[in-house]
Amino acid sequence: MGSMTRCLLTGPVKKIRKPKPWKHTQPITKAELMKLREEFYDTAPHYGGRYERDMDALRAAAEDDISLAQAIVDSAGVIVQNNDLTTCYDERGAKYELPKYVLSEPTNLVEES
């Protein structure tokens, strides 16, 4: 186990929360946001090993009710670095970075016309 993992495992448990309000570079519709999310999950870097299982767990935690997110990441053995899920690690120290657009909606989300 690497020193980063040991440090993360011995630190206080971070209560998962949604990211702070954020604004997309331009107004975006729900459909465009969903397309961005699908593209991220389809093209996210693959680090081998348990990547798919861990990314599936992170996706479930991001898309499910926030009250269930902690149980989801705990059961997958994912170590949360940032309590908004933007940076996490697996048990071997592989890093997962999730963009805010997969974790919450921007403040400039617009209705579809």
Image: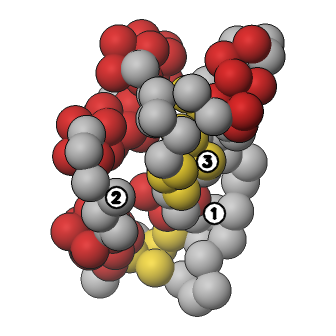
Please state which amino acid type lies under the numbered disc 3.
Answer: Thr
Which marked residue is nearer to the observer: mark 1 or mark 2?
2
In the rendering, which numbered label is found on residue 107?
Answer: 1
Q: Secondary structure at mark 3?
A: strand
* Label 1 to label 2: alpha-carbon separation: 32 Å
In the rendering, which numbered label is found on residue 86?
Answer: none
In the displayed structure image, the side of residue 24 where residue 62 appears, left or right: left
Residue at image location 54% in from the left, 56% down from the top: 97
From the viewer's side, name the closer residue of 10 and 64: 10
Residue at image location 60% in from the left, 49% down from the top: 86
Please state which amino acid type lies under the numbered disc 2.
Answer: Tyr
- The residue that disc 3 covers is 87
Number of callouts: 3
Q: Do labels 3 and 1 touch, CB within 8 Å?
A: no
Q: Secondary structure at mark 2?
A: loop
- The residue that disc 2 covers is 47
Residue 39 versus residue 9 in the image, above or below: below
